[in-house]
Image (tube, grey):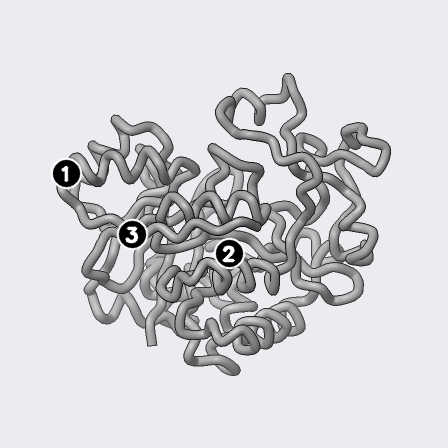
Amino acid sequence: MKRWTLIAATAASLLLAPLAQALDLQGHRGTRGLAPENTLASFAKALGIGVTTLETDIAITRDGVLVISHDSALNPDITRGPDGQYIAGRGPVIHHTAFDEIRRYDVGRIKPGTRYAGQFPEQVPVDGARLPTLDELFALVKKSGNTEVRFALETKLSPGAPDETAAPEPFARALIAAVRAAGMAQRTSILSFDWRTLQVVQREAPEIITVYLTAQQRWLDNVGANDGASPWTAGYKLREHGGSVPRLIHAAGGKVWKALGIQVLAWTVNEPALMGRILDLGVDGLITDRADLARTVMAQRGLPLPRTTPVTP
């Protein structure tokens, strides 16, 4: 059984995973640099460019629908209401809102003048885009004919705001059911900073890869390095494992550290010069908002490219 974990570095963050033969080019939230994040248009763009993995985020509506969203509440930088105006401040919490209500909001255009708009000046708006369901993403990939692309699905929940998301067990079970129903278990990895969901997946769906995400930053320390305890790690405590993150992950059920065959992926890398430097270090993959630029850098180095499967959402 394969396990991954995430660590931080200075130039980029690194994802540790089982070894693979070819570079793993992961489209971050689809291809956020070119199309609205986490929309079907963004995933279609990534498939048309050619990636090995679609990286995305999962939330659950009040009525139990798995939707794709990085944020637990609608983001005012990208969300317009039925009146066509950008919402003022933080929007409705997805888990408190019915699916039909969520679909009334347009997430296809960045609000001009925001910091987010400055980050992605080449993103092409797709007016009318809605938060897609996970089922719709699976259907899009099947429509494209791509039988190889993988899915990296992050469960978005926080012990610090338990009322804003589904509880870990029902969240994980709903995700497992959707992945299995689509026949995608062998092509899916489930990621989380909240390891409680990973414990459920390991117990109930051992055929699905679990990815232990960790951060030891001031803005997020989910392994408890700063205060010695963490609500994120399913009851496992860093101090009880000699302060070692690998030992902590192993205690929680992760196996990759034992194997010592560790794959390194850099994220989120969007500048060609930095991509080149990182690839020259021998990393095994890139997570990027600009898969198009990454492919150019890969081609310059003679690296094999993922096949392209253009599709219309």
Label 3: state its secondary structure: loop
Cβ atoms at labels 2 and 3 below 8 Å apart: no
Q: Nearer the observer, disc 2 or disc 3?
A: 3
Q: Amino acid at mark 2?
A: Phe
Q: Amino acid at mark 3?
A: Pro
Image quarter (top left, top right, bottom left or bottom right) of the N terminus: bottom left
Which one is nearer the viewer's eye here, 192 or 63? 63
N-terminal of the pair, mark 2 or mark 1, is 2
Q: Which mark, residue 310?
A: none
Q: Which residue is mark 2?
A: 193
Q: Which residue is mark 1?
A: 301
- Residue under the image location 73 percent in, 39 percent down: 106
The quadrant where residue 178 appears: bottom right
Instruction: Give the side of residue 113 with respect to residue 64, left or right.
Output: left
Q: Which mark, residue 306?
A: 3
Give the alpha-carbon distance from disc 2 to disc 3, as whole Å: 28 Å
Q: Position of residue 273 (x, y in %)?
A: 25, 26
Cβ atoms at labels 2 and 1 below 8 Å apart: no
